[in-house]
Amino acid sequence: MIRAVGVRAALRKNQNSDCPPPYYSVAVPTQPPPEYGEVVGARGMSDPPSQPYYIPQPMAHVNVVHVSQGAPQRRKKGLSCGNSSCCYGGSGGTTLLLVLLAIAIWLGVRYGPSLVSGSLSEMEKDSCPSKTVECDGRRDCELGSDETNCVRFRSNGGLEVKTSSAGNFLPVCYSGWNKGLADQTCAQLGFRVSHITSSVKDESSTTLTVTGKTSNTIQDKVSVHSSCPNNDTVSLQCINCGRQKLSRIIGGSAANLGDWPWQVSLHFQDSHTCGGTLIAPDFVVTAAHCFPRKVSSYLVPNNWHVYVGMVSQMVLPRPYMVEKIIVHESYDDKTNNYDITLLKLTQRVDYSNNIQPVCLPAYDKIFSPGTKCWTSGFGTTEAGAARGSTNLMGVTVDIIDSSVCNSNTVYNGKVSQNMFCAGDMKGGKDSCQGDSGGPLVCKDSDQLWYLAGVTSWGDSCGKRDRPGVYSRVSRLLPWVYSKMQVIPHCNLF
């Protein structure tokens, strides 16, 4: 039997198994941890085989070689008393400490794991008044959700903005556009500044034109207009992304530095636990099931280290630290719908040939069935293997038609619109334990790599008629952008 080599390229010796094996550490052999059901609640025998490839478990510390390159450790914040009059002591200080302790206890009881996760506001549903108006440039909702889904991009890079007056997304005329507006739009999406802005033809009869209004959001600086002069509309790229040092990857084997420069290794308590994908200098996309809400320690940012620009678990650069863990509010641990999480880093990543962000797809981007894409990670290369790969592996997978994937002989309707399948229906090429949260990327006609999917779940690894299932990034883009955005209360521009 020929075995595909690469990420989750699993032997089919376990193809008769109904459930995926439990997770094992890539760093050191361990005893198998409890099955997924023991962590999140028992599941009946009639439940669909929609378990994630593994649920993270704390692993024993392993000494590895740390190289000097990479991010410095997060600077600790603190106060130095010395002879400063700001230091508290005596009974007054004791009283203050007791009051603070009481407040801390109340907050812990009231908010629990969401508070220690550092993502309290992200875990709660937004509160909006009854007369909320979306995309009018004014923040009505407590968390600003009424102003976060107002900008998107077409496949040709065309910028579309939704305004309260139009009520739908429209292209923006290139006439009157400038670098300052481009920077503001990208900063609104969490990208700080723009990368490239140009014009693209669009024959729409209704468009938006730039006004001279002062506002902190682009949706409040444009107004509805007829067709643009010469049909020139704005094309905008917020970040230089999707580029490799190498022009050609020879597949199904260990990766070299620069092959997959957006690949991230997420370490929980010093062991590789999940993969991830760098999409901006300070944002990483990964899977929600890597952060089970019923295990509060997984929601504590300080328990995680983020490694970039590496291809071996035995030679690690200095890690980046996590500032905030943003789990999708609608994530369902029984069906794995909305299996996506965004990590906000404490500091920006320095780009190099070996560290680059991947491009996010356009909202209307469809990767057709049969498209050859790549998935990568440090997961096991055999289903049920005792340890994962110490080296970053990559393997080609084909996008599979959803009607095939949802047929009664495959996943029987369990693949939602927020998911898609990829792999080989004959088995062999797949992702596996340890790859969860990692990227599935596809190269488009512009020769840039786009994040099509986030490794989510499957029935065993490399099993016939059981391809890997991935979160569909294009469907989840509004959520990703909304969590990257910061909508201030006052006008800044």
Image: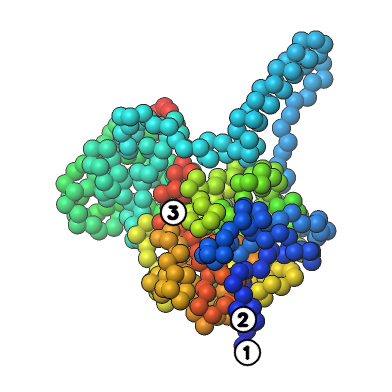
Residue 53: x percent and y percent? 61, 64
Asked if residue 488 lies left or right of residue 462, the reply is: left
Residue type of the residue flagged with mark 1? Met
Numbered disc total: 3
Q: CA distance from mark 1 to mark 2?
A: 9 Å
Label drawn at residue 12: 2
- Tell me which numbered mark, 2 or 3, is placed earlier along the sequence: 2
Q: In which quadrant will I find the N terminus? A: bottom right
Reply above or below: 308 against 177. Answer: below
Q: 340 or 50: nearer the eye?
A: 50
Label drawn at residue 228: none
Q: Which residue is mark 3?
A: 476
Colour scheme in the image? rainbow
Q: Quadrant of residue 202?
A: bottom left
Q: Nearer the viewer, mark 2 or mark 3?
A: 2
Q: Residue at x 36, y 50 (%)?
A: 152
Q: Are marks 2 and 3 in contact (CB under 8 Å)?
A: no
Q: Residue at x 41, y 73 (%)?
A: 407
- Tell me which numbered mark, 1 or 2, is placed earlier along the sequence: 1
Q: 49 or 268: nearer the eye?
A: 49
Q: CA distance from mark 3 to mark 1?
A: 38 Å
Q: Residue at x 23, y 38 (%)?
A: 165
Circle 1 packing at 10 Å, graded few (<14), some (14-19), many (20+), is few
Residue type of the residue flagged with mark 2? Arg
Asked if residue 340 lies left or right of residue 101, the reply is: left
Label drawn at residue 1: 1
Q: Are marks 1 and 2 in contact (CB under 8 Å)?
A: yes
Q: Residue at x 46, y 76 (%)?
A: 409
Residue 464: x percent and y percent? 54, 80
Circle 3 packing at 10 Å, graded few (<14), some (14-19), many (20+), is some
